[in-house]
Amino acid sequence: MTRKTKLATFVALVTWALPATADPDPTNWAAILEEAQGQTVYWHAWGGSTATNDFIAWAGEQIKETYDVTLEHVKLADTADAVTRVLSEKQAGRDDDGAVDMIWINGPNFAAMKEADLLFGPFAESLPNWQFVDVEGKAVQTDFTVPTEGFEAPWAMAQVVFMHDTDDLPDALPNVEAILDWATANPGRFTYPQPPDFLGTTFLKQVLIDLTDNDAILSQPVDTANYEAVTDPLWDFLDQLTPHLWRSGTVYPTTGPAQLQLIANDEVDLAISFSPGEATTAIANGQLPPSVRTFVLEDGTLGNASFVAIPYNSGAKAGAMVLANFLMSPKAQLRAQDPEILGYGTVLDVEALPETDRAAFAALDLGIATLTPEELGQVRPEPHPSWMIRIAEDWSERYGAGR
Amino acid sequence: MFLPVGAGLMGAVFPAFGYLPPAGLTEFSLAPVKALFDWPGLGVASRLSLTTGLLATLIALSIVTLVLAGWSGTKPFRALERLLSPLLAVPHAAAAFGLAFLIAPSGWLSRLLSPAATGWDKPPDLVILQDPYGLSMTAGLVAKEVPFLLLMALAAIGQSDARRRVRVAQALGYGRVTGWLKSVFPAIYAQIRLPVYVVLAYSMSTVDVALILGPTLPPPLSVQVVRWMNDPDLTMRLVASAGALMQLGLVLAALLVWRVGELIVQRLGDVWVLSGRRGARADIFLRPLGLLAGLITAISLIIGLAGLAIWSVSGFWGFPAPLPDQFTLRGWSRNLDGLIDTTVTTFLIAFAATGIAVLLVVGCLEAEFRRSRPITRRGIWLIYLPLLIPQIAFLPGLQTLLLSLGGKDGLAPVVATHVVFVLPYVFLSLGDPWRAWDRRHAVVAAGLGSGQTDIFWRVRLPMMLRPILTAAAVGLAVSIGQYLPTLLVGGGRVSTLTTEAVALAAGGDRRTIGIYAVAQTAVVMLPFALALAIPALMWRNRRGLHG
C-alpha cells in the first residue's frame, strides 16, 4: 500500500464529512461561557505519568469551580486510540455527541485529523488567553511544520534534554558523536525508547539534525529530498551504537517514562526526555535518584509545543474551549511550570504578562535538575512529519521487527 | 454467543479484503493481506504466538498433572490447594507485573542476593524480561494458568472415582504417579479438555500479559494487531483485520496440533498401560518434582504481589537495596480519588455482567435437568466460542457494529460484552457441580408432594449455594480482568482498574503500577472470600451443606 492510497483514504473521508449542527461561535466568548455551563468534557490525554494526571485533575477542579464545567480525564496509553475512536464514529455516521471532546494531540495525529476534516475550529486564536501566548518567540502556530491555523491550542512547551546520572556520567556530552563514544566505552548503559514511540523517533530525529545540520531539507516533505543520502549518517551512527546499547539492542524500553525506572534501578546512566523539568519532578517524586541532572547538545535540541484539539463531533465544544482557554491562563501555566508539580515549559510570553504574574514566574524555583531558559539554548524545529514516519519504518526494518 | 462473535468476525473479514464502505473503500482487494505479509516481523510474531501458547499450556498442564498424580489426597496437597486457589483470582496483569519485578535483573531476587552473593553493585545487563523467545511471558502465563487448570481438574476428580482407582492400582504394585497416570488421568483429561483448549487459545492471543512480559522486536501477533488497530491511518485497520484473521488461523492450527498430540499420546498411552510397567521407582523423582513446581508457581505469584505492595508505598528505591529507603503513603493518597471512582465502576460492571450470566446459566442448567437432556456437544462449543476465538479478531468489528446500531457508550454495551466472556466461565464452574447433584433429593422432595418449581427453590438452590457463589466469584474475577472489551466497546470512557493498570504500565512508574495491581487483586479476592464465608454463615447449623 503506497502512501498515496493512504492519503486517498483520508480524502475520501473528507467527502463524507457532514457539517455539524449549531457549533458554538469561538468569537463570542460570553455565549461560550454560558453554553459551557453544566457540560462534561471528556479529555482524552495520555495517562502514563502520575504528575500529568494530577495536574489534569487539578485543572478539572478549577474549571468546575469557576465555569461549572466538569472534566473527565480519559487516560490513554496511546493518543492514536482517541483518533481511532473519532474515525470509528465517523464510519458509523455519528456526527455529533461523540465520545471524545478534547485530545492531547501530537503532530502526526494532528496532521492526519486536520487533513481528514475531523477537527472543530478554528478556535484557538479567538480564546481570551491567546493574547498572552508567545507567538513571536515560540513555535505555537505550527505543529511539525504543519500550520495549526487555530485548530489546536498550545498548552506546554517541550524541548529535548538528556538526563544523566552524575554518579556514573558526571559531565554533559556536547553532541551525538560524544554520546556514541561514551556509549561505546560504557556498554549497556544507554538506550532509547523503541520507535514508533514518539520519544524514540525523537531521539532518531535529534541524531539526524545533529549529524546533518541542515534544517532546511528536513522541513520539506521527505519525498522531495534525497532521503537516502540525508539519512545515511543516521544509519551509520546507529549501526555503531546498537551493539553497545542496554541489552545489546535486543530489548528497548517501550516509552519515555519507562527510562526513569531504568535509571532508578541503575540499569542505564543516560536517557532522553522531551520535558526540561521532568528530571526535577521525578526526583521530587522518588522516581529518580537525586544525583540526576540534565544537559542539552551544543548545537541545540528539538523543541515543540503540546497542543489540545477538539474533534468535529464533540458534544461539548464550548466546555472544551473553556478548558483550552484555562490551560493557557497564567495561573495554569505557572502551576505547570512548577517542577514540584509538572515542570513543563510555558507557552506564554512571560515578559508581557501583568506585573504580579511576571513576578510569580520569576519567583519560581526551577529546581535542582532543570536548566534555565538561557541554558536550554537554541531550539531547533521539528522536521516535517513524513520524516518521522519514514525513519520509524526504516528503523523497524533495520533494528526492529525486521532484524 | 454466536451472534456477537459472528457479527464481530464479519467485521474483520470484510476489511481484511479491502471492503470498508464508510471509508469509501468498496472494492475487494488483496492489498491488506499483502501488506500483512510484507510486514517484516510476521514470521517471528506468528512463531512467538504459537510457541508461547503451546509451551505455556503444555507446562501448566504437566505441573497440574504431576501435582495431582503425586499428591492428591495428601496433606501437602491440601496445603498447596489452599495456597493456589486464591491465586486464581489474581488478575493477569497484576500477576505479570509481580513476576516481572521478581525475576528482572534489577528485580527482587537479584536484589536479595546482591552484592553479597553475586558481586553485582549494578544490575547485570541480561535479557531476562521480554526475551526474544518469549520465555518470561510463557512463565507468566504458566503461573497464571496452573491455578485455573488445577481447579478445573479438582472438579473433575470428584466425578472420576479417583481414590478407588489409585488404591486398586497401588494394590497391584503400581507406583503412585504411574498408577494415577494410567488409571485416573484419562478420565480427568476427558473432562478438562475444553478448559485446556481455552488456556491454549488465551495464551496465544493475550494482549495485556504480552505487553508486560512479552518481547517487543517484534511483539507477539496479538499485540501487533492492536497496534495496527490503533494506527491513525485508516488503511492500517485493514491490515489489522487481516492480522486478526491470521491470529484466528494460528489459534485454530494450534488447536488442531494439540488435538493430534492428544491422539498420539492416547496411542502411546495405550501401549504404556498394556506394558504393565509398575513404575514404582519413578515416584522418587516425580513426586518431589511435582510438589516443587507447584510450590514455585504459588510462591512466585505471592512474592511478586508482595513486591508490588511494597512498591506501592515506597519512596526512592535504588538498586541493590532489598527494601526502599523510605516508606510513604503519598502514592496512595494522590491516587485515592481515582481509585475509588474506578473501583465503583469496576464492581458495577462486574456485578451486572455476573448477575446476568449466573441467571442465564442457572436457567440453562435447570432446563437441562428437567428435560434430562444434557447440553449437546455443539451447544458446549458455542458457549465456549468467545474464549476460543481470539478477542482481537472480533472485538473491533463488534465495536463498529454497536456504534452503527446507534448504541451509546457507557456501561450497558460494556456489560453486554462482558457477559459474553463471563458466561462461559460461570458455565464451566457451575455445570459439573449442578450435574453431580444427587437426583434422589428431588425424588424424595417429589414424594413429599413438591412440584418442580418448589424443588428448585427450596431444595436445589439452597444446596447449590456454595457452587453458585463460587461460580459468581469466578465470573466477577473474569469481568474485572477484562482489558480489550472494556477499552474497545467502552470507547475509552469506561475506565476500570484493569484498563487503568495497563495504561499506567506505559509510564513504567512502579509505585503507581503497584497501587493499581494491589487494588485490582484486592477487589477480586473480596468476592472469593465472600463465596467462602456466606455459605459457612448461612448454613452454620447445617453441616451437610458445608460441602
Image (cartoon, coloured by chain):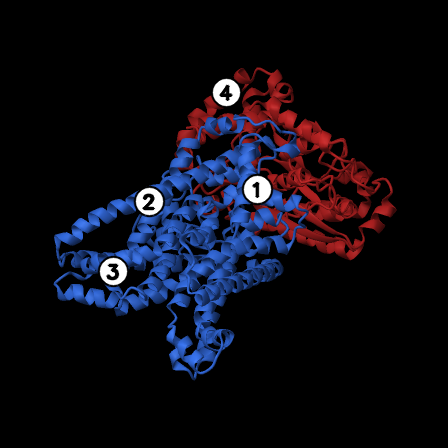
Chain colours: A red, B blue
Q: Mark 2 packing: few (<14 Cα in 10 Å), some, or many (20+)? A: some
Q: Chain of mark 4?
A: A
Task: Please name which of the two marks, 3 or 4, marks the residue nearer to the observer.
Answer: 3
The residue that disc 2 covers is: B258
* Mark 3 residue element: loop
Which three-letter amino acid code belongs to the residue tagged 1?
Gly
Above or below residue B464? Residue B95 is above
The residue that disc 4 covers is: A233
Which three-letter amino acid code belongs to the residue tagged 4?
Pro
Q: Chain of mark 1?
A: B
Residue at (51, 31) in percent of width and height: A173
Q: Quadrant of residue B400?
A: top right
Residue at (79, 38) in percent of width and height: A123
* Mark 4 residue element: helix
Alpha carbons under labels 4 and 2: distance apart: 50 Å
> Along the horizontal axis of the image, is B170 left or right of B456?
left
Q: Are marks 3 and 1 in contact (CB under 8 Å)?
A: no
Above or below residue B17? Residue A102 is below
Which three-letter amino acid code belongs to the residue tagged 2?
Trp
Q: Which mark is residue B397?
A: 1
Alpha carbons under labels 3 and 1: distance apart: 43 Å
The residue that disc 3 covers is: B184
